[in-house]
Amino acid sequence: MVREQAFWWMSSARRDLERAYRSLREDDRAAAVFWAQQAAEKALKALLIAVKGWFPKTHNIRRLMEELGLDLGLGDKELEAAYELTQYYHLARYPDLVEGLPDEVISRETSERAVEAARRLVERAEEALERISRGGRGMGQGSSR
């Protein structure tokens, strides 16, 4: 049986993805990439709770995917785009890291790409959580793609 916490984390991921889209519409590029990263991170943590009962304390999307060890059906380009989200946890929040205002440094194209990468990951994670909750194990084991 999947712990209720997994569904809380997935609901939080979905809300963060909605925040990312709202930020994108408002041309708040720093917020869009930050919420995109958060959505992806929380979706993976939801799956980790469902599969392992815990998750590592990290914001690193690659590390979470590797810890999960499930094939979410993302292609190589989609995985690379998802991995790129990790940087936005800090870059969107700290002007000294980008040597300026994040909204002025992060392009519209970058923010759109980040939100799209998060959407794909969250959707695949939701599908995997549904399968797991029905008694399956996700899309496959032993591989992060």
Image: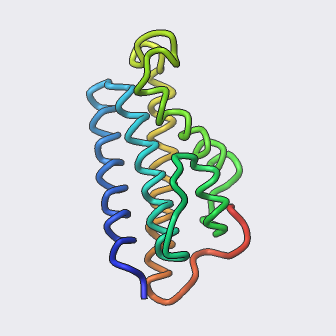
Q: Quadrant of residue 137?
A: bottom right
Q: Residue 9 location, x and y as percent?
A: 36, 63
In the image, taking residue 143 as reference, residue 112 lies left or right, namely: left
Quadrant for the C terminus in the image: bottom right
Q: Residue 112 location, x and y as percent?
A: 45, 33
Q: Residue 115 location, x and y as percent?
A: 44, 40
In the image, taking residue 130 as reference, residue 60 lies left or right, namely: right
Quadrant for the N terminus in the image: bottom left
Kindly identify the residue that appears in the image at 48 percent across and 31 percent down.
90
Q: Can you say whether 59 is above or below 53 in the image?
A: above
Q: Can you say whether 9 is above or below 50 in the image?
A: above
Kindly identify the residue that appears in the image at 61 percent across and 74 percent down.
139
State the residue in front, 57 or 139.
57
Q: Quadrant of residue 67?
A: bottom right
Q: Can you say whether 120 is above or below 36 in the image?
A: below
State the residue in front, 43 or 26.
43
